[in-house]
Amino acid sequence: MSDTLFSDRNSDPLLFDDLPVEDPPASAIPLKQEDLQPTADGADAEAGETPIEPSRALAISDFVPPSNSPTERFIRLAYRLGVSGSTITAPFRKPAKPRLLATVESPLPGDRTAGVALRAGHFLVHGAKVPIAQMDFSSSSRMAPPFERVVHGFSWLRDLSTSAVREQCTETAETVCRAWLKANPDPGKGAAWEVEHAAHRLMAWLVHAPLILSGRDDAWRRGMLATMESTARWLDRNTGKAGDGLARAAGWCAIAAAGLLLPEGKPRRLFGEAGLIAALGDLVGEDGGVLSRSPLAQMDTIALLVDLRACYEAADRDMPQALGVMLELLVPPLLALRHGDGGLGSWQGGSATPAHHVAGLIDASRVRTRPLKDVKHWGYQRLAGGKTLVQFDAAPPPKPRHARWGCASTLAFEMSDGAHRLIVNCGGAALAGGQVPCRIEQGLRATAAHSTLVLDNANSTAVLLHGQLGKGAEKVELDRREMGSGAAAATRVEASHDGYAARFGLIHRRILMLRADGMELRGDDILVPESRKGKRGKIGYAIRFHLGAGVEARLAEDHCGAGLLLPDGNYWHFRIAGDDRGARVGLEDSLWVDGDGKPHATQQLVIEGLTSRGGGQFSWLFKKMG
């Protein structure tokens, strides 16, 4: 993949023939060279330029664990030491038989298409279809990660419940449950007994219990309830050992839910609440963004808390205030990554999650707020002007202990005009195993798969196997300002990273400036020597702008610009500054993964050439015409 779609030079067109050349609309006036002036280092001091004040929002300091009475602290300690819940709550009575104390009504919607496919006898995961009868449910089977999450995590129960009324779904639900339990009769090793999958499985059983417990087979019902109890006990012992923060949060959520809905569960509930609050404190940053910086992980965390709140409501109990505050913290950063079409940007392995999925989650959260504009720890800057939205990755990549589908995307950006995406990242690494081949997963996480500068075809941060990241960008400096007023108003963001400092002795600085009316985005990519004495020689560079699906591109005759026609007829002109470095704009093949996990053949604009190892500056402009 890295040698074809993401190669720096001389890549052969493998996906489709060149787009037909069309004349631009009459309103598309060619840019003049004087329209594009490089941003000088001293240009920051223009009149009217003032720093942006951070918006007022909840912070992690507002997330305070509840105070427990001495009795509750003793109960929690005894349960943590292994004393059973029945011994603590009713020491002189026989343990209660497993049963459900309430029926949960989750507000989270499922995927109706996937649910209909289940009723027709197939698992449908990110567009890939596998017959249920041919599925190997055993924990030792080799499944692609997306199938592991769906099959062993039982998220398919939510999809099934959305597809039809309960009576039409119970037979399918019981059939798949029986097949899974036959293949996994006892706790063991493998994917099925990873803490995260076991936690999601127990939550699905508890929340969607009517689907799997409404049959007339009393033996099956008793066995299923016993399995819920044994899974909860397994999570009691193993959740604290999970190495991933989101996995621990999922485990503690399931433990708290089991404490609410299974008999004699108060000790387990107290135990789960304490563990969950501690896990969320380690998982979430100061401004509400998860430390993996993954929008998918952010959505998973919100969904866990929404389902847990539904369990509290079913049990007629109030959810701890700290968990409600955390839910309010998690939503605004996610909103900052919505484009004009309502879907999410493609960041840290995620894809362009469709608008209705995001809207359904936000509605279910009951949090009404605005997106954060200046998110320092979450790291994604949001610039808005007119109908134009820009998302800018202005933070270091996640630490190895937090990374899930870690990407070397520092200083990449995405841009949309209304409902259409103009500049994107390839995305989709987390969906590899569906319609996205697993063999290109690492390529989708590379710097070249993002709209940013690449030196010598090297990643700004090392991309390793299994979603992990190595050494690279560790320090990102950021400055955001509002400039001018009235018609001349603009938002200016400047950021730099040291990902290429160790190897090439250069710091990459990127400046983005979006006009308030959204008609113009100016950019500068600057290479600055790390030390006063720069190195001698030349080095290859490429600045990539991956185009959204449906964007038609036509190169200018002088190869210093291009015309970009959006599906709705809007026309943008792209231009670079002409100078003596011989920079030219080229058009290469690319790939973009949509929110349903389907890859699309697209194109990318590439500025490439050689630059001095002593530094350089490359200015470019996107201008909306007409």
Image (spheres, rainbow, N blue to C red):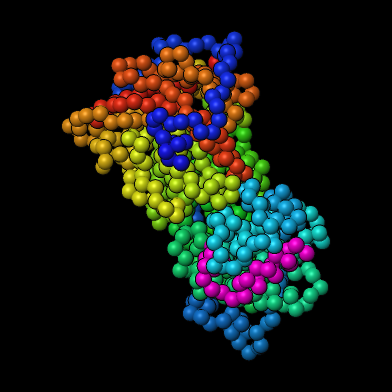
Total tally of numbered discs in the picture: 0
Q: Based on the displayed image, in which of its 4 quarters is residue 400 positioned? A: bottom left
Q: Residue at x 53, y 64 (%)?
A: 191
Residue 344 as seen in the image, left or right of residue 506: right
Residue 130 as seen in the image, left or right of residue 477: right
Q: Is residue 404 above or below residue 346?
A: below
For the C terminus, which image quadrant? top right
Instruction: Magenta stretch: give its range.
Output: 171-196
Instruction: Report x, y in % for residue 542.
Output: 38, 30
Instruction: Report x, y in % for residue 16.
Output: 55, 30
Asked whether 259 or 437 is in front, the reply is 437
Asked whether 282 or 581 is in front, the reply is 581
Q: Is residue 128 above or below residue 320?
A: above
Asked whether 110 or 389 is in front, the reply is 110
Q: Residue at x 53, y 44 (%)?
A: 428
Instruction: Report x, y in % for residue 12.
Output: 46, 31
Instruction: Report x, y in % for residue 142.
Output: 54, 61
Task: Name the chief secondary structure element in magenta.
Answer: helix
Q: Residue at x 52, y 67 (%)?
A: 190
Q: Is residue 417 above or below residue 287?
A: above
Q: Residue at x 50, y 38 (%)?
A: 426
Instruction: Tell me if residue 402 is in the magenta stretch.
Output: no
Q: Which residue occupies the extreme left position in the image?
A: 533
Residue 392 appearing in the image: no
